[in-house]
Structure formats: C-alpha cells, structure tokens
Amino acid sequence: MKILSAAQTREADAQTIQEESIASEELMERAGRAFAGWFENKFTPEQPVYIFCGPGNNGGDGLVVARLLHQRLYDVQLYLVNEGDQTSHDFQINLERLPHEVTPQAIKSKKDLPAIPADACVIDALFGTGLSRPVTGLFAETIDRINQSAACVTSIDIPSGLYTDKQTPLESAILQAAYTVSFELPKLAFFLPQHHLYVGEWHTVPIGLSPRYIKGAETNNHFINQEEIQQLLKPRKKFSHKGTYGHALLICGGYGKMGAAVLAARACLRSGVGLLSVQAPAIGYDVLQTAVPEAMLLPDPHRKHLSRLPESLEKHNALGIGPGIGTERVTKTLLGQLLATTELPLVIDADAINLIASSEKLKAQLPKGKIIFTPHPKEFERLVGKTQNEYDRLEELRRFCREYTCYMVLKGSHSAICTPEGDIYFNTTGNAGMATGGTGDVLTGIITALVAQQYSLKEACQLGVYVHGLAGDLAEASVGEIALIASDVIEHLPQAFQHLTANQDRAR
C-alpha cells in the first residue's frame, strides 16, 4: 500500500474528479460522509459536538460533517475561523447548504473563541494536507484553545498545523488530536514517533479515489497490511519434511546474556524453520539444552564469549548473529571472519551491529545484497549517524541501504523496513507493551527462520516484522501492555500464524 505525498493527494483528487466527471464538491460530500460514518460509530449524539472550520477545503469538509451530524441528531456547534473574508469555492457551496438550524459563529479574534466543555467532541477542520507555512495568529490561538481543553479531539484528514510529508517548523502551532481520520490512505507524518502527540490514534476511510492514479503513482514510501502479508505466506505441502523448511544458524549469547540466545532460538523455531543450530559460549550449554531442546547446540570453545566460527557454515540456509554476544575483541574477530568468508544471507542485530558501527574495516567487508540489519534507534545512530529529525533519519536510512546494498529494519512503533533501492515499508502491527527487553531478539529469530525457509530478504523483513507485531498484539490482548514480556510474544506466535493462515484460506 502506497503513502502519497501532499501533492500526489491533490493530484489523486483531481484525477478522480476528471475520471468520474463529477464536481469537486461531490468528492467533498463523499469525504464528509465517510468521516461522519466513522464518527457516528465512535461517539453518541448525547455528546455535544464543536466543529472548527478554516476557510479552505478542509473547512469545507467540516461543513459537510456539520450538516450530516445535525441530520443524525447530534448537537452541533459550528465555528468558522478566518482572519479575512476569502474562502474556497467548495467551502462556500457547503456553507450555503447548511440547514437553518445550524448557525455558524464567526471567529475573527481571540475574544470570539468559545469555552469548550470537557465532555465535548471537538472536530478539527482548520487546515488539511495543503498547509505550507507555519500556523500563527488567530489560527494558532484557536489551536491553543482546543489543546488546552479537556475535550476529545478528532482531526479531519490530518491534525491542523502538521505538515504531511516534511518537517513542521518549530514555531507552528499544531493541534493535538486523540483521533485522526484520513481519507483513503494514511499520511507519512502518521508513522513518525515525533508526531504521536498530535496524530493520536489514526484511521483511514475510503472515499473512492482513482485506483488508476494510485496504482501509477510513484513513491518510495509504503505501508504493509494484512492482505499483502497473507499473499506472502507460503502454504505447507503435505509431503514436506524438516529439510524442506531450511536449516538456520544462530550465533548468539554471552556471559550474563544467555537469555537473548534462548529468546532468539525459541522464536526461530516457532516461525517454521525445519532445523536450528545455535552456537553459543560453553557456559550456555546447559541453559540452551534445557530451555530449547528442539535446537542443536554448537558450544564455542571459549567459556564466556564467542570466539570461533562453527565448521561447515555452508550446510545452513541463513545465519542470525548478534543477540547477547557482547563486544569482546575475539568476538569482533569472529564477526570479521564471517563477513569476509560467508555466502549465507545474514540477519545482523544488537552487539553485532555495534561492532560493525565501531569499525570502518567491518563496514567495508559487508557483502552486498545479503544482509538484513535490525537496529533499534540507538544502534541505528551508532551505525548510520545522528540526525536532526525523523524525516532526516528516513533519508539517512535510504542512503545507508543504497550505499551498502542491504536491507534494514529500523525498529519502533511503526518499524521501517528499507530496501537497497531506498523503498521504505512501515509496519502496522505492534503496541507499546513490546517496548521491553528481548523483543528485538525475538524478531531476529523470526526473520532468520523466514530467510532459511527461502523467503526473499524483503519478504522475510515484511512478514517477520508484521507477524512479530501481530503476536505482540495478541499477547497484549491476553496480558495487557504493562505486564507484557518478550516470552509472551513467542507464546503468541502460533496464534499469529494461525490468524494469517485462517484469513488466507477465507480470502481464497
């Protein structure tokens, strides 16, 4: 699924109007109906509704919503915010369509702003995706008044003051919404952690934008959803055996961090791999044999650290390295030998990332087209460099993946998967309960298992991240966000895969 820029969204509107031979106000009516339908399912008519409209087309959307909610017996209070007298064509048309029972109140100065009851539902229709300059003056004062209220705020299409696909200036006032309802597709701004305070919980509603335009639109920003993931998932064959589903090797664990090896190994096995070998320091022998009896253990000669590559690497189909390995000199040497000699696809996480980040020599040894990095933000910063904001970080992510011809999963609330071509795919599963130690090790195990099963590196990233988040969502439903731990995610991997295969069968 594509994420369109603000300019492309305007082009999609225009092409839809042209293809269907409709007036622009008809598309606005369609958008208003879609929003009102969502709103009606969320809020009851017993709650007063305060709608704040700007003078442009986002304000026109708000006027349509005001009329429709009034017809559905909501108590609508309508406010028109404008420092001048100019309004858009579609705004004016929908202003004239208001029933006489809905009397708009003009806000020309700060003294005109109403007190907003704590039990009110506020609908923000001040500015949409076309905003190109910081919000100041009367509009900023209106946003501040809404933000200071205790009312529940829902923004139409995008929170007013927030830029769609570039950094919003610091001096701009930005509305803080509890909910944002976007038309047809989400905006890039929704996926960046710096904007959560403003976007809140976002939803999309279809308004019938031109499928032809969306299909042909060029973008390197995408998001992944369940339908696409189900198409990636490979069904199991009746006459298959353990050799059919690959042999994965995990090089992980260290003194005091054998738990990372256990988590990665258990997740790998729960993700469908046929065979799993784990190389870990000798001190972890009893731990792994007891905690993960399905895995074959390759004890390292060194008691506490990883020091030597296992023999016969070529018999494996994928290799994951990093969880819990530490940054000892002998381990760094092992990693250099691995990068210089292996032909296997590699999933590189945790301390393996930190070791590579600390050495230009190791960076120069990275094999092209065979690596998936899975850093959290701090590891990313060490590997790629610091950035000023989230938009700059996305560009640095693209640059690094292009330069080193690698894949990267930048972990977060909406984990960003970047390809060697610079395409970014944002994940749509997962929750705040997964912000706990060990969940990254679980992801390493999942992705390594999928690569071993002959999923392409891109497919393994997309499917792995999605099912990891889905298992986390299922775990959250069972134990809640606060109590959730990494083992809960592993425990719910079977349900996550069952959910995808069951819905896959129904789709067929």
Image (cartoon, rainbow, N blue to C red):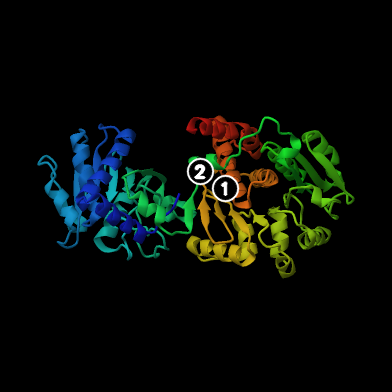
Q: Work out whether mark 1 precedes mark 2 in sequence or the reverse, and give the earlier one.
A: 2
Please tell me whether mark 2 sits on a helix, a strand or a loop.
Answer: helix
Taking the view exactly as shown, the residue that stands out farthest to the left is 100
Please tell me whether mark 1 sits on a helix, a strand or a loop.
Answer: helix
Q: Residues within 10 Å of mark 1 (few under 14, many from 20)?
A: many
Q: For the residues labelled 1 and 2, say whether their Cβ atoms are less than 8 Å apart.
A: yes
Taking the view exactly as shown, the residue that stands out farthest to the right is 301
Q: Which residue is mark 2?
A: 228
Residue 185, position in %: x, y? 39, 49
Q: Nearer the viewer, residue 23 or 373?
A: 23
Residue 197, position in %: x, y? 43, 51
Residue type at the position of mark 1: Gln
Residue for point 47% across, 53% down: 222
Q: Which residue is mark 1?
A: 462
Residue 481, position in %: x, y? 55, 37
Q: Residues within 10 Å of mark 2 (few under 14, many from 20)?
A: few
Tell me how far mark 1 sits from mark 2, CA to CA.
9 Å
Q: Nearer the viewer, residue 505 or 223?
A: 505
Task: Describe residue 152's horizontal placement relative to residue 369 as left or right.
Answer: left
Residue for point 83% across, 41% down: 297
Q: Is residue 498 above or below residue 1?
A: above
Task: Describe residue 303's horizontal placement relative to residue 436 as left or right.
Answer: right
Residue 431, position in %: x, y? 53, 42
Tell me where residue 64 sits by quadrant. top left
